[in-house]
Amino acid sequence: MKGISPLVATVLLIAFVVSVAGILSIWLNSLTVSTTQLVGTEASIAITCSYGGIKLSDLAFSNNFLTGGIENTGSISLGNISLQIVYLNLTTEKIPLCLEGGIAKNCSSPTLVLSPRDLIYFNISASSNFDKIRVLTNCTSVYFEAERSDVSQ
């Protein structure tokens, strides 16, 4: 049984290496393009969100209802606004908000949008063993947290 000649083996090896290098270059190019686009999008969102600000005010708890105001203190509109209540046993409850009759209330998905300098009041049911209240937005870096001591009872 005869083997292949060294010249043919060399040519086949070079062809194999060149084809693998071609496949890797195509894959690496597509990876670079998609990563660059993702980083650009995330950077754009981060820059836009840096102009955002939100604040809780006039917080009160009475008869298992938590009330207060949410104000957009930034210069961009903020959406998907929800409240997160942290309880003393460290469990959390996320409450999506939507506008109903001029007041933000609990709903199935957050549809509340606040334009710059908008102030809206909320009224939600909550347990009395809360520790903190957070307001969350579509910009993950834009939130506000109030302690139990900030809530009049």
Image (tube, rainbow, N blue to C red):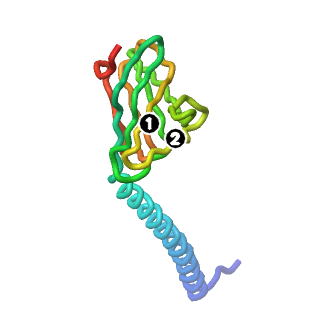
Q: Tell me: residue 129, above or below residue 45.
A: above
User: Which residue is more in the foreground, 58 or 3?
Assistant: 58
Residue 56 position by quadrant: top left
- The image quadrant where one finds the C terminus is top left
Q: Tell me: residue 41, above or below residue 15.
A: above
Label 2 packing within 10 angstroms: few (<14), some (14-19), many (20+):
many
How many numbered marks appear? Answer: 2
Residue 151 position by quadrant: top left
Query: Helix or strand or loop: what does disc 1 sit on?
Result: strand
Label 1 packing within 10 angstroms: few (<14), some (14-19), many (20+):
some
The amino acid sitting under disc 2 is Leu
Residue 2 in the image, given as x and y percentages of width and height = 68, 80
Q: Tell me: residue 134, above or below residue 60.
A: below
- The image quadrant where one finds the N terminus is bottom right
The amino acid sitting under disc 1 is Ile
Q: Residue at x 48, y 35 (%)?
A: 82
Residues at badges 2 and 1 in contact (C-beta under 8 Å)?
Answer: yes
Q: Residue at x 35, y 53 (%)?
A: 75
Query: Which of the numbered marks, if any, corresponds to residue 120?
Result: 1
What distance separates the C-alpha of mark 2 from that of mark 1?
10 Å
Query: Which of the numbered marks, if any, corresponds to residue 112?
Result: 2
Which mark sits nearer the N-terminus, 2 or 1? 2
User: Which residue is more in the foreground, 40 or 35?
Assistant: 40
Q: Residue at x 60, y 82 (%)?
A: 12
- Furthest-bottom residue in this view: 7
Residue 59 in the image, given as x and y percentages of width and height = 36, 24
- Furthest-front residue in this view: 101
